[in-house]
Image (cartoon, grey):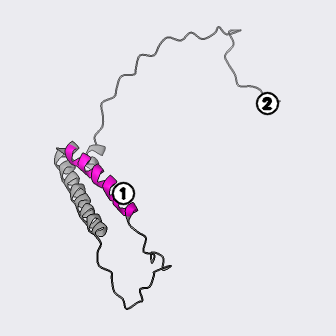
Amino acid sequence: MQNVVLIIHLLLALALIGVVLLQRSEGGGLGIGGGGMGPQAGRPPLTGLAKVTWGLAIAFICTSLALTVIAARNSADTSVLDRMGTEQAPSEEPDLPDVELPPADSDAPLLPPRED
């Protein structure tokens, strides 16, 4: 169920991106441009593309909420904070391959280089 809703969610996201990119820029985003509408003109009527954008946005929000509910239902009964206090059993060290080191020149212990 979660995979189906997730695929629908991704398709809605792509469609929403496409529809927004298809719309005509009306200026006014940063207060520049604006066309022939004055401050008393009011809002223009919604175009068909704007209605599709609103519909896709509402469907996108609904699938987001549905995914949140599904994920909460599938999650464990304990909180992450509850699991942080528990100690894990020590794991065994992995078997490392035997690596042979080159023989030392002398039997003297290895020392760091001298400061001259």
Q: Which mark is residue 18?
A: 1
The label on residue 115 is 2
* Label 2 packing within 10 angstroms: few (<14), some (14-19), many (20+): few
Q: Nearer the viewer, residue 86 or 96?
A: 96
Residue placed furthest toward the bottom: 40
In front of the other: 45 or 80: 45
Determine the residue positioned at 22% across, 59% down: 59
Instruction: State the extent of the magenta-drawn residues as a range.
Output: 4-22
Q: Nearer the viewer, residue 103 or 64?
A: 64
Of the numbered discs in the image, which one, if any, rests on residue 66?
Answer: none
Say above or below: 33 vs 75. below
Q: Is residue 76 visible?
A: no
Instruction: Name the amino acid, label 2.
Output: Glu
* Rendered position, 86 above or below 34: above
Q: Is 69 displayed left or right of 16 in the figure?
A: left
* Residue situated furthest right in the rendering: 116
Magenta segment's dominant SS is helix
Image height of 29 relative to 76, above or below? below
Asked whether residue 9 is drawn in magenta, I would say yes
Q: Is residue 80 left or right of residue 32?
A: left
Q: Nearer the viewer, mark 1 or mark 2?
A: 1
Residue 27 in the figure: left or right of residue 74? right
Mark closest to the chain's N terminus, 1 or 2: 1
